[in-house]
Image (spheres, rainbow, N blue to C red):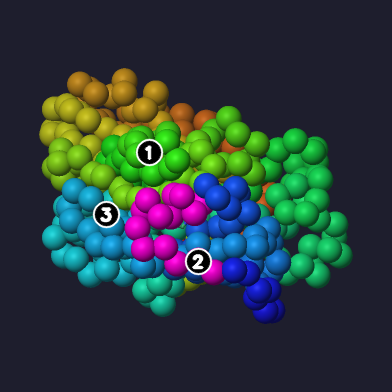
Amino acid sequence: MHLDPFELHRPTSVEETVALADRLKGHFDFLAGGTDLLPNYKMHINLRPHVVALDAIPELAGHSLERIGAMERLAELERDDAFRRAYPSVADALREVATPLVRASGTVGGNLLVETRCFFFNQSYFWRASLGFCLKADGDRCHVVPQKERCYATFSGDLAPALMVLDAQVEVAGPDGRRRVPLTDLYDEQGDGIRRLKTRAGELLVAVHLPPESRTLRGRYRKLRVRPSYDFPELGVAVAGSWDDRRVTSLSLAVGGVEPYPRRFDELTAPLVGETLSEDRVRALAEAVTRAVRPVHNTFLLPDYRRRMVGVYVRRAIAEARGSLAA
Ligand SMILES: Cc1cc2nc3c(=O)[nH]c(=O)nc-3n(C[C@H](O)[C@H](O)[C@H](O)COP(=O)(O)OP(=O)(O)OC[C@H]3O[C@@H](n4cnc5c(N)ncnc54)[C@H](O)[C@@H]3O)c2cc1C
Ligand code: SF4
């Protein structure tokens, strides 16, 4: 597999990047660590003639407990003891992204915007050509759910659920200026699965912001994958909250790796605030989340198994966040 030629741009500020993206009118991709984009380019998936590298923009680098630059490498966060202690759900997720080598190049922004995955899509050009291309690249039909309207490729980033439960916000910059949106609003649940984000054309992810209150929460991220040293999630469950023996003061839960977008389930966790977190309530919550998710058959493990494991992982994540491994 080889990379086809493209024109490489290397702006040095957010403003220059936004102006350049505006001029290129969608005929480009942003390049962060390249661990997702470049393998896809090598498989001739959705090539663009221009690539805008983000590694020379100082504002996108670095992190503190409040702000993570979009170009911060996953390995840099993982190395920071204070960050790991402050955000246990994110620390869990970081440890389980791919391999140390991928984490040395892969960035936070790239992880949040990682392309969705499907075993009919993440294949070489020749493999895809022999079967017939699909809606997401070069074709007009879906091989997983036969129809021509919607792609069901799975969102397989580990960080998004772990950051969602902390009320993280993302800062984006575009032709109309800068804005902050909750991370939960970044992904377009109503979209066709191909256009997956609510960002506008040419908008750049600048940073992730974390509220100070999120540092007081107990949290966990638990991931199901086939090869524990390497694979993308077949399921990822994040929880964060605060509670004592008598009552829950806050609880949030998000799931990734089973649908085209990561999803937070406030409608199921909100009724537990003010209640005791009894085993029966946790079991009922796990069953409700299991009923709510809709995996399809486009990854290694069968959808029914992944769906049933959602309940198991919800119970485990909550039990471990409470400091008990009994689930
Ligand atoms: C072998 C292997 C295993 C992997 N396993 C996992 C895994 O277990 N879990 C997991 O989460 N990921 C996994 N990945 C995917 C990927 O490596 C990581 O998600 C990584 O964090 C992506 O970051 P990146 O900087 O390399 O992104 P890139 O490849 O540079 O970019 C990814 C996408 O995001 C866009 N983008 C990047 N930054 C910005 C920005 N600031 N603004 C706007 N758009 C932007 C790019 O245009 C591109 O579409 C794996 C990859 C490989 C090769
Ligand atoms: S879910 Fe369907 S359209 Fe999407 S990548 Fe897979 S086969 Fe293609």
Position in image of residue 103 (x %, y %) = 38, 70
Q: Can residue 256 be seen in this view?
A: no
Tell me which numbered mark, 1 or 2, is placed earlier along the sequence.
2
Q: Distance between the residues labelled 3 and 1?
A: 20 Å
Q: Do the residues labelled 3 and 2 touch (CB within 8 Å)?
A: no
Residues drawn in magenta: 8-21
**Quadrant of the rendering where the N terminus is positioned:** bottom right
Residue beneath the point at 52% across and 47% down = 22
Q: In this view, does 243 lie above or below 17?
A: above
Q: Does the residue labelled 1 lie within 8 Å of ligand 1?
A: no
Position in image of residue 90 (x %, y %) = 29, 54
**Element at badge 1?**
strand
* Residues packed near mark 1 inside 10 Å, few (<14), some (14 to 19) or many (20 plus): few
306 in magenta: no
18 in magenta: yes
Residue 9, label in figure:
2
Query: Of the residues shown, which amino acid type is indicated by label 1?
Result: Gly
Residue beneath the point at 79% across and 63% down = 128
Q: Distance between the residues labelled 1 and 2?
A: 21 Å
Residue beneath the point at 18% across and 28% down = 249
**Element at badge 3?**
strand
Query: Of the residues shown, which amino acid type is indicated by label 2?
Result: His
Query: Of the residues shown, which amino acid type is indicated by label 3?
Result: Ile
Q: Quadrant of residue 37?
A: bottom right
Is 90 situated left or right of 188 in this image? left
Residue 68, label in figure:
3
Q: Name the residue under label 1.
A: 177
Given residues 182 and 248, the one toward you in this image is: 182
Q: Do the residues labelled 1 and 2 touch (CB within 8 Å)?
A: no
Given residues 267 and 6, the one toward you in this image is: 6
Q: Is residue 101 visible?
A: yes
